[in-house]
Amino acid sequence: MMGLADITREDVLKAIQEHDALGEESFLLRYGFEPVRRLLLVHEGRRYELGAIAGAAHRYALGQLLPPDVLAGDRESPIRALTELGFEVQRSKTAAAPRLLISPSYGSAESRQHWKDTLDRTVPFTDEKYSRHLTGSQRQQLLSLHPEGCSRFWGATPGHDSKMAAVTTGDVVLFTGKNRVRAIGEVGVIFRNREFADMMWPPEQGGDSWHTVYSLREFQTTELPYAVLNTLLGYKSNFQYPGQLVLSGERAAAGIDGLLITTRTALERAGAIPPPGDVRMMQVEQQHTRTVTVEQPARQLLFDRTEAELVSAYCASLTEVQAKRFATVAGICDLYVDGPNGRELIEAKSRVERSHVRAALAQLLDYARYAPAPVDRLAALFPAPLTLNALGLLHHYGIDSIHRTAEGTFERLPAPEPRRRFIRDLVGSGNH
């Protein structure tokens, strides 16, 4: 590609320095790039949009930005140019949709003891008692996701090998027992190791070893009746989940999205939060500063039952629409509805206090820029009516308010049409 051969390592370092000074969002906005994160430049442990850095480096070298549409037509040239300058380039992996594991885990006395040993508390896998049973690769993988050296663990017996073969990091686990989902987890590292499993869960005399082991990146207890899960998964209302299930495709998505489950892995893949070990160094502005404040990226809850139930009830009241979610560098939205009345982005909140209204407003404006297609309306969903002051805040920015009036029924309070047009024009000029 013309021009890339003329950039130097110093030009690339200047572009990186500018990126760090501005922050990713402002840097990409300045040069007109989108945070797609398919090709990444890795420098001193940090990851950068390859195209944006190459385009900015071109400006430093030749005084003219290499536009995004030019770079999009030839991805290999910037890879070649920057690797020849000694930089590391990574291609991001296209992640398969997460699977949904349903794991009976609280029925027998034995499983309840296992729960107490490795779910109620973490296991210090770096202690010699445990680490001597791990291979070097297994220990390294565990430390990459759990750098603190401890994690919760669960597993499966050899009879489930075929089901567990495809399970991977970022898949979701529903731990069941006593007619309800008792906890929700996110799979971390998964491997087979009989000795390590037996150290955590000694098998009964003549019993099977839990030779498949997986750590949990996230773990959250809950009390979710089977009836709720059965409705989402399309099972009969009295289905009891007698054995291990590993669901994929539309049925897994129905459970994960229906419960508004937001995994750490999904947020990392979207670029919303840095992966473990991605430490960002910051320069000290003044020598005599006593403290340094580091802004942490927003972290969504793995699962919020109140919001999930609210969204599920609202979706059940809709007809002739498709309700989905999408992941962005800002996080994962609650609802993206596409139907006869156009495309709508909806953010749900479990409470109606002003702080929650403001949070909904901020998230809607952030997510709307990354919607798969420009949205026609923005709306916030609440369990009860808002105060006039809070409603006025949403309406001022052209955002509708939707609240539950009774079981299964909702009322929409639309923003004035001129304000709706204002926000539609504003978010429509985002990344589309």
Image (cartoon, rainbow, N blue to C red):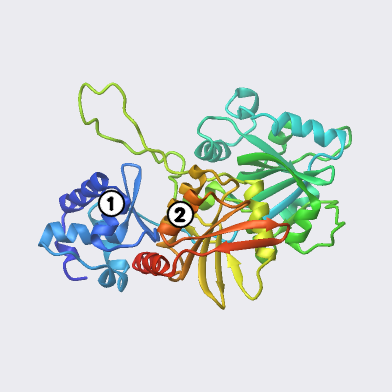
Q: Residue furthest bottom?
A: 340
Q: Which residue is mark 2?
A: 392
Dot in front, 2 or 1:
2
The answer to whether 111 appears left or right of 69 in the picture is: right
Disc 2 residue type?
Gly
- Of the numbered discs 2 and 1, the one sitting upstream in the chain is 1
Residue 348 image point, x, y percent: 57, 54
Depth check: give the residue in front, 158 or 100.
100
Q: Residue furthest left?
A: 63
Depth check: give the residue in front, 54 or 358.
358
Q: Which residue is mark 1?
A: 87
Q: Secondary structure at mark 1?
A: loop
Which corner quadrant of the image does residue 85 belong to? bottom left
Residue 167 appears in the rendering:
no
How much space separates mark 2 and mark 1, taking CA atoms?
51 Å
Residue 124 appears in the rendering:
yes
